[in-house]
Image (cartoon, rainbow, N blue to C red):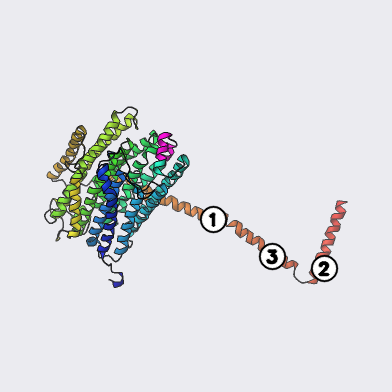
Amino acid sequence: MNLRNRPRGPWVYVAVTAVLAAVVAAWAVPELREHGWLVFGQSSSGPGAPLPSLSPDLFLFPQAAQIILLAVGIGVLVQIYSTAYLGHHPRYRSYALIIVLFLVAMIAVVGTTNLWVLLVGWEVMGVCSYLLIGHEWQTAEARSGAAKAFLVTRVADLGLVMAIIVIGATYGTYDINGAQAGALQDPKNGTLIGLLVLLAVVGKSAQFPLHSWLPDAMPGPTPITALIHAATMVAAGVYLAARLFPLYADSEVVLTSMAVIAAITMLMGALFALAQTDLKRALAWSTVSQLALMFAAVSVGLAESGLDHLVAHGVFKALLFLGCGCLMHAVGSSSLSAMGGLRRAMPVTFWTMTIGFAALAGVVPTVGFFTKDSVLAAIDFATEVENGPLPNGMAWVLLVVALLTTFVTAAYATRLWLLAFFGPVREARDAHEAPRTMTGPLIVLAVATFALSIGKHLDARIGVISTIVAALGIGAVVALWRRGSALGPAPAPLVSELGLDRPFSRWIPAVVTSLSRLVVDLDRDAVDVYPRGGASLVGLASNGLQMAQSRNVQRYATAIALGVVVLVVIGVVAT
C-alpha cells in the first residue's frame, strides 16, 4: 500500500461524528423529555408542539428530533463499525467524511422549516448516496448501482422542486409552518402539491414503480447500506410525506394514490424478499416493504404511526445489515448458500440478529411488534370511519394487504434466520466472530430494539390478530424446515422479480439510446444544413466577387459592354 494513501486515524472520524451527535443530543434530548420522549404527537404542549429553534430556519418538532437522534446515533455506530470493516481501505478518509456530510444533510432536511434549505439537504443526500454506493468504483456493479440510484432519485426529485414552487406561489411563503397555517385556513392546490410530493418521496423511498434502485445499491459497503436503509436516505421520503401532509390532506386523489402504491409495494417487496438467495438483497427488499407500511399509515391520515415505525425500523434494520456485514466478514459472501450452521461459531452475531429478525417479524416484546401494531391499528381505524381520508373500500384493501404482508414478512424473516444460522455448515471454512468494534454496535442496537418498546401503546384486538398472522408465517417456514425442505427455490417469476426492473435496465436505456441517435441524426442532417448551406453560399459569393475583381481590363470592358446591351434591350422592350 502507498504510504501516502494509507488511512490515518479512523477513530478521528468516529470522534467527529460523536461530537456532531453530542451537539444534536444537547439540542433535542432535554426538550424531548418535556414534550414527550419517543411518543409521537403526544407532547405536554399539544400535538406536534415545536421545540426551541436554534435559528428561524432550524426548528425541531418532537418527531423530527427523534429522527435526527436516530440518524446521528446510527451514524456513530456505523463509523465505529467501519473502523474494523473498512479501516484498511486507502479511500477511508473520503468515505468517513462523506458519512459526516450525509448526516449533516439529513439534519438539514429534518430540522428546517425552509423548503429551499430542505431541498439543498435533500440533494446533498442524493450526491452522498451516489458517492458511498459507488465507493468500490473499480467494480462494474458498484458503478452501475450508484448511477442507477442517482438517476432514478434525481428524476423523482424534480417533483419536489416543482412542489416547492407551487407551494410558494399558492401560499406566498416557502416556510413549511406558514404554508401549513395557510392550508388550515384555506387549502388550495392540494392535489397538485400532493402528487408532486408523492413523486419525490416515491423515488427517494424506493416505492413502486421507482423501487428497483434500492436493491441494486447493494454493491456499496455494508455499513453504508445500514445507514441508507435505516436512518437517512430512504427515511427522508417518509418524513417529508408526513411533514407536508397538511398541504394535501384534503385530496382524496393523492391519498388514494399513496395507498395504492403502498399496498402494491409492501406485498411485492415482502414476496421478493422471500424469494432471495442473497441475504443483503433480501434485507433491501424488506426495507422497500417496510417503508410502504409507513406510507400506508400516512395515507390514512395517521402519520404519527408511520413515523413511529420509521424510528423502530431504523434501529432493527441497522442491526440486521450490520449483522449481515459480520456474516460476510466470516464467510466472505452475502450469499445464503455460503452460510448455515453459524450460530455456535458466531454467538454474538446470532443472538443479536435473532432479536433483529424477531423485531422484523413483529414478535413480542420487541419494538417492531408495537410499532407494526400501531400502523395496523391506524389502517383498521380508517375502515371504521365514515368520510375518512380514504374510500372505505380502499381502506379495507389496504388492511387486508397489510395483514398478508405481515404473514409474508414473518415467513421470510424466519427463512433468512434459519438459512444463515441453522443446518449443516455449507462450506469448509474457519468461521469466527467479528471484532468487537463490529459486534459492539450490534449489542447496542439489540438492546435498543427492546428499550424502545417501553411505554408503547397496544391495540389489543389488532395485536392479537397480527400476532396470530405472524405466528402462522413463522410456523409455516419452521414446518417446512423440519420436513427437510431447503426453503427454495422460489417460483421463477419471484426469482426474476417479475421482470419489473426491465424498463429501467433495458427499455428506458434502449429508448434513450434511440432518441439520442435520432437527435444526432437531426443535428447532422437538418440543423447543420443551415450553417453548412450558409458557408457554401458565402463561398459562392466570394468566388463571384473574386471574378468581378480580377484586375483584367478586357473582362471589365466586356462586362460594361454586356451591361449596356442589357440596359438598351430593357429600354426598348419597356417602351
Frontmost of labels 3 and 2 is: 3
Question: Of 173 and 260, which appears nearest the observer?
Answer: 173
**Residue 78 in the image: x percent, y percent?**
25, 56
Disc 3 on helix, strand or loop? helix
**Residue 320 in the image: x percent, y percent?**
22, 50
Q: Earlier in the sequence, mark 3 or mark 1?
A: 1
Q: Which residue is mark 2?
A: 557
**Residue 504 in the image: x percent, y percent?**
38, 49
Q: Which residues are magenta?
A: 179-194
What residue is rendered at 15% in x and 55% in y?
A: 426
Q: Earlier in the sequence, mark 2 or mark 1?
A: 1
Q: Which residue is mark 1?
A: 523
332 vs 555, left or right, is: left
Tell me the crowding category of disc 2: few under 14, some 14 to 19, or many 20 or more residues within 10 angstroms, Cα based.
Answer: few
Q: Which residue is mark 3?
A: 542
Tell me the crowding category of disc 3: few under 14, some 14 to 19, or many 20 or more residues within 10 angstroms, Cα based.
Answer: few
* Residue 2 in sight: no
Whether residue 193 appears in magenta in the rendering, the answer is yes
Question: Of 514 and 360, which appears nearest the observer?
Answer: 360
